[in-house]
Image (spheres, rainbow, N blue to C red):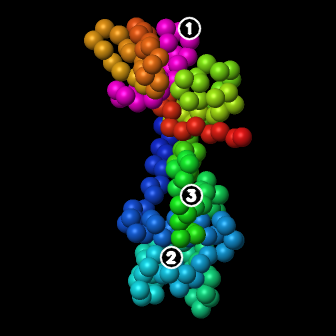
Amino acid sequence: MAKKAAVKRDPAPKQPAITPRQREIFEYLREVIVARGYGPTVREIAQHFGIASPNGVTCHLKALEKKGLITREAYMSRAIQLTESPQPAAALSLIGQLVVGQLPEFHREPHSRLEFTGLFASAAHCCIRVLGHGMQDEAISEGDYLVIRRQADCRDGELVLAIVDDTTSAVRRYYRESLRIRLESTNRAKPAIFANRVKVIGLVVGVIRQY
């Protein structure tokens, strides 16, 4: 029987390397385009990042264009476009900080935003809904969604979702001992779980709660 010829596949294209400042500007371009449908002007970019000269912004834009991340049209003030359709980012305005019992301290800068895309953008991330009240000692309530980064291993002290002895689940901090695994509750008053077989589903990296 004739052997089938092996099909050689081209490697997946690599993301072009960019500097940290270029990354910040690129993320800002994407945020503005997603929010209002068109890109910012050079002047808006300069004001946002505190860049004194428009030429400094233009240099960064030329670099992003050369690396294939954006396109620009000459003689148009709002001609910056992303080469790939932007996906909505999971970000919220960060308006200040709060100590319970005191007045909130609001930020003067209205454009400050807290980015949550890292919790959701990766294919390794998933979520699981909590039912019942078995994790109240971990400050996790019924109806919460745990954001999980799926991985089979972890380091000591990391908070994990795990299957214990093939019989029960636990959201605990993981510690290796010489002959067994110790799972510690975030509530110090709650006794630890000791087990011989612990299967880590992934790291707990966030909790989503809707009231």
- Please tell me in which quadrant of the rendered image residue 147 appears: top right
Q: CA distance from mark 1 to mark 3?
A: 46 Å
Q: CA distance from mark 3 to mark 2?
A: 25 Å
Q: Position of residue 196 (x, y in %)?
A: 40, 8
Task: Identify which amino acid the numbered label 3 is placed on.
Answer: Pro
Q: Which residue is mark 2?
A: 48
Q: CA distance from mark 1 to mark 2?
A: 54 Å
- Going 64% across and 34% down the picture, which residue do you hit? 145
**Disc nearest the viewer among 3 and 2:** 3
Position above or below: 33 against 154 = below
| Residue segment shown in magenta | 153-172
Q: Position of residue 204 (x, y in %)?
A: 51, 33
In screen coordinates, is 111 left or right of 59?
Answer: right
Q: Nearer the viewer, residue 51 or 101?
A: 101
* Magenta-drawn stretch contains 174: no
* Residue 167 disc label: 1
Query: Which residue lies most toward the right here?
Result: 211
* Magenta-drawn stretch contains 159: yes
Task: Identify which amino acid the numbered label 2 is placed on.
Answer: His
- Going 56% across and 8% down the picture, which residue do you hit? 167
The secondary element bearing badge 1 is classed as: loop
Q: Earlier in the sequence, mark 1 or mark 3?
A: 3
In screen coordinates, is 115 left or right of 60?
Answer: right
* Residue 104 disc label: 3
Q: Are marks 3 and 2 in contact (CB under 8 Å)?
A: no
